[in-house]
Amino acid sequence: MKTMKHKAGFTMRVVLSILLVAIIIFPIYWMLLTSFRPVTESLSSPPNFFINLKTVTIKFYETVLSGKIGSSTNTYGFPTFFMNSVIISSITTLVTVFVSLLAAYSLVRFSNRFSNFLSHVLLVCYLIPTIGLLIPMFVMAVDLKLNNSLWGLIIFEIAGALPLGIWLAKAYIKGLPVELEEAATMDGCNRMQVITKIVLPISVPGLVVVGFNTFLGSWNSYALPNVLIDQERYKPMMSGLYLYFNQNIGIVWGEMMAASILSMLPVFFIFFYFQKYIVGGITAGAVKG
């Protein structure tokens, strides 16, 4: 009897897991289908959930990679948006990881009332929704002439990413053995050498988590770029993709899906490459923090 119940429970868990995975993967699968077949097939009723190899086309990818958006006359297209996102996300990630490491180390190793208060302030800053800060950030950007500028957007992206980055790095560094640093100090290392030669190498899993979260947030950022940038040549990926919903030419579904698939590739590659560090960093931070 127990064996039957165990088998029934196991079967139910497997079925629910498969169903959940299917629900998550189906939108990506449909995007992939739409990007490789004519629009008439994608909009057919009833819908066809399988691809017809005889009508497979890559013309949407060719159009997207050439920088065109349907029949519109936009000067800038996917290649420009993609490179802008690469620049913004890369610089934002590198600066955030570097500052988060130093700030988190200071908060952990020089703990006092002020540092504890500052840690809670950082957490509160992270909990404030971005949408509530858009107008103040826009006014500040205009006053400082940072709107319509990649560097201006990078500065605000870093400011938005630092609270979470510092908090994650702090949770990981708190679990590192202080004896290693004391031994390095006795060997003649100064504080910066301790950080670069001892703390940094063993903090890689935690910093990878900080970097991945920062990169993902910056890459997928939509509201902030939309508010700070209105010139097409400075638009990043998510903001630029909205141009495929052009009111003058309609929604170019094939190109929209092709551009969306291409925009997902960097995140997939980064995740699979750093997967073991990301999983290890998350679990270590959860236990030690």
Image (cartoon, helix red, strand yellow):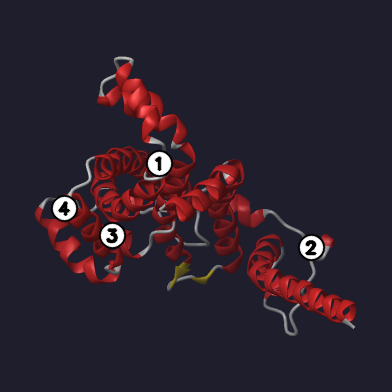
Q: What is the three-letter code of the residue carrying label 4?
A: Arg
Image spot of residue 149 (x, y percent): 25, 48
Task: Kindly state the secondary structure of the residue where label 2 is placed.
Answer: helix
In-front residue for pair 33/204? 204
Residue named by callout 2: 55
How crowded pointer 1 is (Cα within 10 Å; few <14, some 14-19, many 20+) is rated as some
> Which mark is in front, 4 or 1?
4
Q: What is the three-letter code of the residue carrying label 1?
A: Ser
- Residue 53: which quarter of the image? bottom right
Image spot of residue 181 (x, y percent): 35, 28
Residue named by callout 1: 90
Q: What is the three-letter code of the residue carrying label 3?
A: Asp
Residue 113 tag number: 4
Image spot of residue 72 (x, y percent): 46, 62
- Measure the C-alpha gap from mark 2 to mark 1: 38 Å
> Which mark is in front, 3 or 2?
3
Residue at 41% across, 46% down = 172
> Which mark is in front, 3 or 1?
1
Q: Going from the N terminus, do you reach mark 2 or mark 4 first?
A: 2
- Measure the C-alpha gap from mark 3 to mark 2: 38 Å
> Which mark is in front, 2 or 1?
1
On screen, residue 215 above or below 30: above
In-front residue for pair 156/125? 125
Q: Are marks 3 and 2 in contact (CB under 8 Å)?
A: no
Q: Going from the N terminus, do you reach mark 4 or mark 1 first?
A: 1
Residue at 32% across, 40% down = 95
Residue named by callout 3: 230
In-front residue for pair 239/105? 105
- Measure the C-alpha gap from mark 4 to mark 3: 44 Å
